[in-house]
Image (cartoon, rainbow, N blue to C red):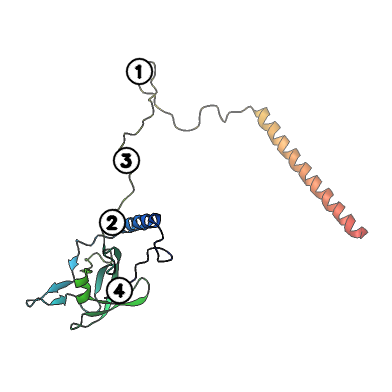
Amino acid sequence: MVRLIYMVNDNDVIESIDDLSAVEAKEKARSAAKPLIDHLEDAVDKDQFGNLVLNAKVGDKIVIERFATVLSHRPWLDTKTYVITNVDGVTGDLCLMDTDLGQSAMSNYITGTKAGYRFKLPNAKGMSIGKRKRGRPRKNPTGAPELTKPVELDSNGQPVKKKRGRPAGTKNRPKDVIRAEKKAKLELKKAKATKRKSTTKSKAKKRKAK
């Protein structure tokens, strides 16, 4: 079993009641994110003599849920999935591999179970160790009635059918207006080109004068 120091803040010291409240709030937030593994099969059972035995072998995956053993209220530490690389059936030592981090780890299913750790076997669906909600989020998660737009009615009291596309007449401009706009754009383009040429010539004259 790996014993870890539970860090209460950056300095590992509770300086005031306000600090203690902040720590409790963080701990509650962490506990709310704890994966659900109750539906998974237990990886540790007892034999006919009452000894703890592991129902997994080298190469199998195992889910370990750890709690802090140095604090009286035993907060949740983490829940991870490992691959078993070695098992000592006498001492209960487990050599593990954290495939997500690419690091080896150690645990003990005998002392860990006695300390309150939980050892589970992943289900047939793979690495998922908790129930995850699928699908799109609800548009109205609060359940409050949604506001609807008023329906426009005609003179007979029937709903007016909305027409698709642009409103009539928005693209039907007079031809003389269109010609005037094109002419103005062309003149502006010519003026910019003339100004650009004169600027280039003046710069060239200055360079020659130097």
Pointer 1 local density, CA inside 10 Å: few below 14, some 14–19, many at least 20:
few
* Residue mark closest to the camera, 1 vs 4: 4
Mark 1 and mark 4: span between their CA atoms?
76 Å
**Foreground pick, 69 / 191:** 69
Relative to 185, 119 lies left or right: left
Most extreme residue toward the right, as rendered? 209
Report the disc number at residue 3: 4
Please give the label number shown on residue 142.
3
Question: CA gap, disc 3 to disc 1?
Answer: 34 Å
In which image quadrant can residue 170 be found?
top right
Q: Nearer the viewer, residue 188 or 109?
A: 109
* Mark 2 or 1, closer to the camera: 2
Name the mark on residue 132. 2
Q: Is residue 189 above or below residue 177?
A: below
**Residue appearing at x 33%, y 40% in the figure:** 140
Gap between marks 3 and 4, in whole Å? 43 Å
The kind of residue on which mark 2 rests is: Arg
Residue 175 percent location from the top left of the image:
65, 29
Looking at the picture, how far across and down is residue 151, in whole percent?
Answer: 37, 25
Which residue, given by chain and number where applicable, does mark 1 sit on? Answer: 157
Quadrant including the C terminus: bottom right
Q: Quadrant of the N terminus?
A: bottom left
146 displayed left or right of 179: left
Q: Which of labels 3 and 2 is toward the front?
A: 3
Residue at 33% of width from left, 72% of height from top? 4
Q: Nearer the viewer, mark 3 or mark 1?
A: 3
Instruction: State the residue in front, 133 or 32.
Output: 32
User: Which of marks 1 and 2 precedes in the sequence?
Assistant: 2
Residue ID at (50%, 32%): 166
- Amino acid type at circle 3 is Thr
